[in-house]
Amino acid sequence: MKELRTEKTRADIAQAILRLEGNTYSLVNYPMFEGIFNTPADRIVMRSGRQVSKTITESANIILDTSLNPYYPVIYANSSSKQTQAFSSSKLDPFLIQSPVIYKSCMKAAHVINNVYSKRLKNFSEIHLSYFSESADRVRGTTGNSIYLDEVQDMLYDAIIDAEQCLSAARYPKFTYAGTSKSMLSALEYFWLQSSQNEWIIPCEGCNKWNRPYMDIIGKHGIICKKCGKSLNTYKGRWYSFSEEDEPEIDGFWVPQIIMPMHCQVPSKWAQLLSNLEKYPEHKFLNEVMGLPIGEGSQTITEAMLRGMCNENLPMYQKRCPENSRNAMHVAAGIDWGGGTSASRTVLSIYAVYPEKPKFVKIFGKIYDAGEPSKHVEDIAYWVRRFRVIMAFGDHGGGNFAMSQLRSMIPDIRVVPVMYTEQNRPYRWDDAAARYTVNRTIMIDSFLMDIKQNIVEAVRWEDFAEFAVDFLNVFEEIIGEKSGIPRRVWRKYPEKPDDSLHSMVFGWFACRVLSGMLDFTAASPSTSI
C-alpha cells in the first residue's frame, strides 16, 4: 500500500479501511477507544477488564502499523502459546482477509507469508508473533519497530525489559502493554502507575457531577451518578488523567466493563454483570469485570525463614579457611549478572559443599554496584580463585558475554551458563550450547525446600542481612487462568532487585550437580514452608 497522507486521525483510518465479519469496523459503540488509537505517545498501557475488545483494538493497531508503513516490523507476544495462536488466527487473520483494501493491497503477492507465528505483507512489513512468561529468549534477536505485549500481568518484569531490547535499533520505537491487573505487584500495575492513569469519567446530566468508573456507580439497570442516582450516558464520557506526574512517560487507559456500551447499554448483559457481582468472589469481580488489582501476591519467603538458615557461629571470612570449609569436599560458586534494569546488580555466592551430609553452606558473597556485568568479571575471577572454587554456575540470559570473559580468565575452572526457561523438566543439559536450561519455578521451589530441610545454610545474619533484602522482594503468584492452564510462578517487585536469590540458586544448583543430587522435587513452598 502506498504511504497514506491524510488529515484523518488514526481512528478514522481504521474505520475507513478495516472490515470485520462482513461489516465496517466501527468505533461508534466504542468511543473510549478513539483516544487509544489517536494517542501520540510512544508508550501505551491498557489496563482492562475481560471482554472489552482490548485484543481487537491491539489487532487493528498492528494492521495499521504494518499496512500503512512499508518495511515495518511489529512484534506481538502473549504470555501463552495458546493465546498467541488464537490472536493470530481469530484477531489478525480476519482483518487481513476480510478487509478488501488490506487484502488487495497487502496480501496478494508471491512473497506474502501468513503463518501462525509469522506474517509478511506485500509491502514487506512483518508481524512476528511469539509468547513468553518467565524468559524472553523466544523473542531475543527479533527486530521490531513496535512491540505489543498482551496479558502483561502474567509476564516477568525482567523478561519484558529483555523483550524491549528488540526495538533498540528502531528510530521511533513504540511499546504497548495490555492486560488485566490481578495484584498490586504485577508488571502491568507497575506500568499503570508510571502512566497518565486516564479514566473514562462520565458527566451526570442531572446534577453535573463527573463520575469515575468505580463500584459506586453500578446501579440496578446500568451505571448511575454517585451523587444523585440518575442514569449515566457513557457516550458522553471522556478521558481524564489522574496521574500526579506532569509529563508521565506512558499514556495509560483503564477500561472496565461497566463503561462499555456492550455491557452497560444492553439489559441482558447488565443483568449478567449484576449476577457476577453476586456470585463472584470479590477479587474475581474486581479483576475480571473492573480490571482492578487486589492484594500483593503470596509472601512465602520470610525474614524468620532466612534467619533460620543462618549459622550465627559462622562469620563471612575473606578467604577459604578451616573455620568456613573444614572437611568440605568441594567449593562451588553462583553468579547472577546485573544489567537490564537500574535495580539489577551482579551478585556472587560461594558455597562449601558437603555431599555426604548433604549440606551446602554459603560461606562468602559479594554484591556489586549496578552496571555492565563485564566490569565485575576480573574481581569475580579473583574471589573464585581465592576460595579455590572448582565449578561456577552463572546466569546465561543477561550475562552470556560476561560468562565467556570469566571462562577465559579461569580456564582451569568449570564455568557453566544456566538459562531459566519455561520447560516442563527441572533441568536439561544442552550439549550443543554447553549450558543447562532449567525451569525457573521448580528450581526456586527446590532451593527453598532445601532451606527448609536444613540442607542449605549461610553465614551469620549480621553478614547475610544485605543479601536477604533481595529474597524479600520475591513473592508467589498464579498466572495463566485465561489460557485454561493456571500455574504458580515466582515474581518480584518491579524495579527492586532479586539478584542475591538467583545467585544462591545458581550456586546451590552447582552444589547439587557436584553432589550427584539431581532429583528435584517441585513442591509448593506456599504449603510446605
Image: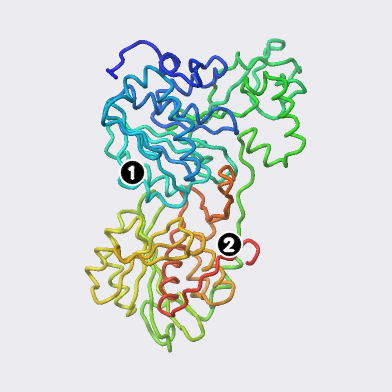
Q: Is residue 240 left or right of residue 210?
A: left
Residue at the image position 60 percent from the left and 51 percent from the top: 297
In this figure, which residue is indicated by the disc labeled 2? 301
For the question of whether residue 126 can be seen, the reply is no
Which of 334/370 is in front?
334
**Which quarter of the rendered picture does the C terminus lie within?**
bottom right
> Looking at the picture, does residue 37 appear above or below residue 386?
above
Residue at the image position 31 percent from the left and 43 percent from the top: 142
Q: How many marks?
A: 2
> x, y percentage for residue 223?
70, 21
> x, y percentage for residue 384?
32, 74
Of the residues shown, which amino acid type is indicated by label 2? Ile
Residue at the image position 31 percent from the left and 20 percent from the top: 105
Would you call the spot at circle 1 few (<14 residues within 10 Å), some (14-19), or many (20 or more)?
A: some
> x, y percentage for residue 139?
36, 46
**Which quarter of the rendered picture does the N terminus lie within?**
top left
Q: Is residue 322 left or right of residue 21?
A: left
In this figure, which residue is indicated by the disc labeled 1? 165
Question: Where, by quadrant of the figure, is residue 47 drawn?
Answer: top right
Of the residues shown, which amino acid type is indicated by label 1? Gln
How was the colour assigned to the protein in this rendering?
rainbow
Residue at the image position 46 percent from the left and 60 percent from the top: 439
Q: Nearer the viewer, mark 2 or mark 1?
A: 1
Q: Mark 2–mark 1 contact, CB under 8 Å?
A: no
